[in-house]
Image: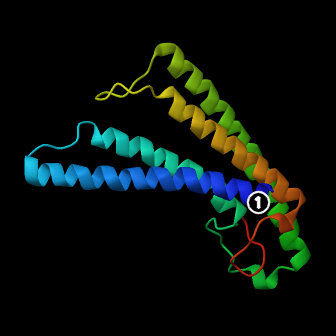
Amino acid sequence: MVKKLLPTLCGLLAGLALFGIMVLTFVDVLGRKFLDASVTGSLELTELLMVVVIFAALPLVSLQREHVVFDSLDRWVPAALRRVQQAAVDVLSMALLLGLAWLMWQKAGQMAEYGDITAQLKLPLAPFVMLMSVLCGLTALLHGVLAWRPGFGQSSAPGPGPA
């Protein structure tokens, strides 16, 4: 169920944000070309939507094991050692992502407390940082599952490699 729900929700979130960027860019270019006026705050909106795209795609990339890997030496490393290496990388990734999620959550709380907003549109920043934190935490939990259940993720590359 998780293998279907996670790609659906994260893919939908990333896809909607990317579609929003596309529509915003299209309208902004048309406005500049024909009306000599761009969309107010289009750069801010694009930046915030890019954050959503990147962090929503992070769990998907981890699930599919599509991170950049260095696998030039894999043919000389025994399969058992590669499995141990992959589990170690997943545990380390989990720990680092959990730490990052915690720090982001703390920062989002500070931003909410201080009332941090974007410069032009005055949009609150805390919800975006909270979303980043939640998606990092979700990715961390996913790496924990991948460490203990290596077959859970799908690999497009032959043999497991570091994530």
Which quadrant is the C terminus positioned in?
bottom right
Work out whether residue 20 or residue 156 is closer to the camera in this orientation and state it: 20
Q: Residue drawn at (66%, 38%), measured in percent from left and top?
A: 134
Q: Residues within 10 Å of mark 1 (few under 14, many from 20)?
A: few
Q: Position of residue 137 (x, y in %)?
A: 70, 41
Q: Position of residue 116 (x, y in %)?
A: 43, 21
Say if 11 sits above or below 69 in the image: above
Q: Position of residue 8 (x, y in %)?
A: 65, 57
Work out whether residue 77 or residue 113 is closer to the camera in this orientation and state it: 113
Work out whether residue 131 or residue 104 is closer to the camera in this orientation and state it: 131
What amino acid type is highlighted by mark number 1? Lys
Q: Residue drawn at (48%, 45%), measured in percent from left and top?
A: 51
Q: Position of residue 37 (x, y in %)?
A: 12, 43
Counting labels gives: 1
Task: Name the side, left or right, on which 53 lies relative to 70.
Answer: left
Task: Name the side, left or right, on which 57 lies relative to 47.
Answer: right
Say if 38 sits above or below 19 in the image: above
Which quadrant is the N terminus positioned in?
bottom right
State the SS at label 1.
Answer: helix
Say if 94 sits above or below 60 in the image: above
- Look at mark 1 in the image and give the residue it sits on: 3
Looking at the image, the residue that sits furthest to the top is: 113
Q: How is the image coloured?
A: rainbow
Task: Name the side, left or right, on which 156 lies relative to 53.
Answer: right
Q: Residue drawn at (64%, 43%), measured in percent from left and top?
A: 135
